[in-house]
Amino acid sequence: MQRRALRENSYRARLARRLRALSRKHLRRGWRHMQDLLSREGWRVNHKPLRHVWREEGLKVPQIRRKRSRIGSSSDGIMRKRATRKNEVWAMDFIHDRTQDGRSLKMLVVIDEFTRECLALEVSRHLMN
């Protein structure tokens, strides 16, 4: 079997170089904004190949990292602290699920935050009654 050797698409390579340069300049902008900037520069590119090149190059808008909320009011707020010993902080969670026949199941899980040990696991169809 014989196959033709693929030639590198120079247009696509130029587009990738320009996208990298624009994304370094405009850090908080995505591919849609880049398409607008490219069209202002005279590039005629459809959104589908542009988005494909954007993904191939691994370009992403960095996610904003939110600060964790403080405990208490703004005047006497303290930072969240991790548990330092056993039985200092317990966490509880309700889990809702369904059986194969469609009937509901409710679970109450209580864990110790320091040891990650499950202290209680209550399963019932009606936990609140």
Image (cartoon, rainbow, N blue to C red):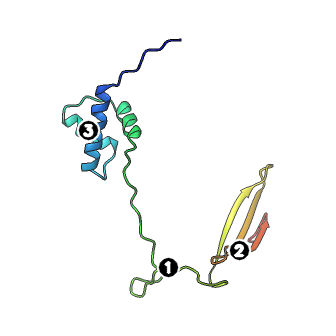
Q: Vertical placement of 120 versus 20: above or below?
A: below
Please state the horizontal and vertical placement of residue 26, each as a whole percent of the image: 26, 50
* Residue farthest to the top, as pictured: 1
Determine the secondary structure under disc 1.
Answer: loop
Q: What residue sits 31% from the left and 49% below the top? A: 29
Depth-wise, is mark 1 or mark 3 nearer the camera? 3
Q: How many marks?
A: 3
Depth-wise, is mark 2 or mark 1 nearer the camera? 2
Type of residue at label 1? Arg
Determine the secondary structure under disc 3.
Answer: helix
Q: CA distance from mark 3 to mark 2?
A: 53 Å
Q: What residue sits 41% from the left and 38% below the top? A: 56
Q: Find residue 105 and report its image quarter.
A: bottom right
Callout 1–callout 3 Cβ contact below 8 Å: no
Type of residue at label 2? Glu
* Residue farthest to the left, as pictured: 41
Q: CA distance from mark 1 to mark 3?
A: 44 Å
Q: What residue sits 39% from the left and 60% below the top? A: 64
Earlier residue among tags 1 and 3: 3
Q: CA distance from mark 2 to mark 1?
A: 21 Å
Please state the horizontal and vertical placement of residue 95, each as a whole percent of the image: 69, 63
Crowd rating for badge 3 (residues with CA inside 10 Å; few <14, some 14–19, many 20+): some
Earlier residue among tags 2 and 1: 1
Q: From the image, tell me which residue sits under label 2.
A: 117
Rendered image: mark on residue 80 = 1
Rendered image: mark on residue 18 = 3
Front residue of 101/110: it is: 110
Crowd rating for badge 2 (residues with CA inside 10 Å; few <14, some 14–19, many 20+): few
Type of residue at label 3? Arg
Determine the secondary structure under disc 2.
Answer: loop
Callout 2–callout 1 Cβ contact below 8 Å: no
